[in-house]
Image: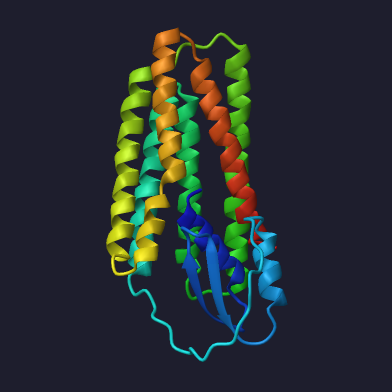
């Protein structure tokens, strides 16, 4: 998952803690400033439970009580959600047709990001219990799909399977790269007045871009080596990362 996805995971995890007044994310430097009243123990524990490498740096008093809200947050989330989910469908469909596990795995990574943005939007105005239920369903569904993918990789690895369509792998992944570029543009545009967030948006699709490039390289190697192994290897790597992201989502349901 990308850095904005991690931001949403943290926001959802801390939602419901009444002492929190505002969260200020500095993603490039991986820092979070929490404006709150009362004890910090519950906040610190919740962040650490996400296993994102969080630790308390310092605490200090402040007189700040008013915070600027991002009025375009919902619109931004809907736009990025729509793009990610659309390419989940595109890559899943073309992956099955072309027999490419790399495309199928990359589609699940797109779905993972969609889940995170979708949980934030569907639960807006709802209770913390509702958010946790949605997170649990999303996490288990994602793990189930990834496990099915692993089983299929093993079947193809030891079986006599036809070569995946390398041209489809490459072409679809190129379009996925373009889609990630559009997501990057949307987030840059919405945060253009904040230099820190401009830098954060440069990190936005780093993982997805690496996955897309991985599938493209796998497609080239499939054609060059006349072997399906490169496709199966990249598929296995991405499936593993998808499961890792699913466990982070499940932590929100606890």
Q: Is residue 63 above or below residue 48?
A: below
Q: Which color mode does the image show?
A: rainbow
Q: Is residue 234 left or right of residue 195?
A: right
Q: Residue at x 62, y 64 (%)?
A: 132
* Quadrant position of residue 127: bottom right
Q: Residue at x 30, y 36 (%)?
A: 175
Q: Is residue 181 left or right of residue 136?
A: left
Q: Is residue 41 above or below residue 166?
A: below
Residue 169 appears in the figure:
yes
Q: Is residue 66 above or below residue 146?
A: below
x then y, percent, for residue 137: 60, 54
Q: Residue at x 51, y 61 (%)?
A: 7
x then y, percent, for residue 196: 39, 64
x then y, percent, for residue 222: 44, 14
x then y, percent, for residue 102: 47, 28
Quadrant occupied by the C terminus: bottom right
Question: How many numbered marks does the figure carry?
Answer: 0
* Quadrant position of residue 214: top left
Q: Toward the viewer: 232 or 33?
A: 33
* Quadrant position of residue 220: top left
Q: Residue at x 62, y 53 (%)?
A: 248
Q: Toward the viewer: 103 or 126?
A: 103
Residue 165 appears in the figure:
no
């Amino acid at each position: 998952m990308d850095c904005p996805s991690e931001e949403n995971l943290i926001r959802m995890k801390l939602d419901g803690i009444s002492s929190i007044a505002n969260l200020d994310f500095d993603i490039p430097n991986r820092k979070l400033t929490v404006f709150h009243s009362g004890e910090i123990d519950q906040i610190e524990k919740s962040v650490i439970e996400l296993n994102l490498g969080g630790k308390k740096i310092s605490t200090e008093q402040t007189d700040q009580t008013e915070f600027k809200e991002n009025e375009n947050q919902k619109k931004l989330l809907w736009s990025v959600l729509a793009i990610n989910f659309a390419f989940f469908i595109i890559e899943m469909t073309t992956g099955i047709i072309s027999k490419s596990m790399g495309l199928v795995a990359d589609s699940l990574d797109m779905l993972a990001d969609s889940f995170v943005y979708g949980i934030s939007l569907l639960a807006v105005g709802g209770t913390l219990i509702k958010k946790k239920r949605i997170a649990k369903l999303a996490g288990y569904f994602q793990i189930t799909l990834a496990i099915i993918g692993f089983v299929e990789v093993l079947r193809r690895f030891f079986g006599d399977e036809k070569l995946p369509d390398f041209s489809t792998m490459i072409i679809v992944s190129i379009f996925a790269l373009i889609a990630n570029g559009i997501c990057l543009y949307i987030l840059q545009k919405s945060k253009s007045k904040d230099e820190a967030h401009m830098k954060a948006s440069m990190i936005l699709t780093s993982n997805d871009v690496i996955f897309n490039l991985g599938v493209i390289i796998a497609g080239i190697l499939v054609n060059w080596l006349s072997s399906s192994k490169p496709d199966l290897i990249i598929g296995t790597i991405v499936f593993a990362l998808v499961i890792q992201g699913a466990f982070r989502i499940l932590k929100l349901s606890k």
